[in-house]
Image: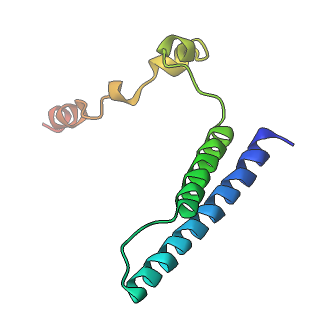
């Protein structure tokens, strides 16, 4: 199995356990409100929430792929001079054609 597939499976496991811990928290708080007790969160729900966040973070790391270097030099080695030198910022669209046509018509 590839790391991307393992990461996606772990991502779904982390997501489902996070949804379950959210639902458990909601149910527990509504129970405490019904019996009018203090808001004490059970350790099981807290551990499940932390476990799901850690599993989800690991899955994101596995799916993300390799990092690229920050230095521009490594990216510029891959490009030819034609790709680097032809930027649209050097194009001039306001040329002298309208002035030349005015002189010809006069």
Residue 78 position, x and y percent, is 61, 16
Which residue is pictured at 41% across the width and 88% down the height? 34
Image quarter hosting the N terminus? top right
Vertical position of residue 105 compared to residue 36: above or below: above
Vertical position of residue 37 compared to residue 106: above or below: below
In front here: 65 or 58? 58
Residue 48 position, x and y percent, is 60, 58
Vertical position of residue 23 compared to residue 69: above or below: below
In front here: 27 or 96? 27
In front here: 59 or 29? 29
Q: Name the side, left or right, on which 34 lies relative to 57.
A: left
Residue 29 position, x and y percent, is 44, 77
Residue 106 position, x and y percent, is 12, 36
Residue 105 image-quadrant placement: top left
Which residue is pictured at 36% across the width and 74% down the height? 38
Q: Name the side, left or right, on which 1 lies relative to 99.
A: right
Which residue is pictured at 52% across the width and 58% down the height? 46
């Amino acid at each position: 199995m590839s790391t991307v597939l393992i990461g996606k499976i772990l991502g779904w496991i982390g997501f489902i356990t996070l949804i379950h811990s959210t639902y458990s928290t909601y149910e527990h708080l509504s129970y405490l409100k019904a019996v009018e007790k203090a808001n004490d969160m059970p350790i099981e729900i807290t551990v499940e929430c932390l476990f799901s966040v850690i599993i989800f973070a690991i899955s994101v790391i596995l799916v993300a792929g390799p990092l690229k270097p920050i230095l521009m030099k490594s990216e510029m080695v891959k490009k030819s001079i034609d790709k680097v030198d032809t930027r649209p910022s050097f194009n001039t669209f306001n040329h002298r054609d309208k002035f030349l046509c005015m002189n010809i018509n006069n």
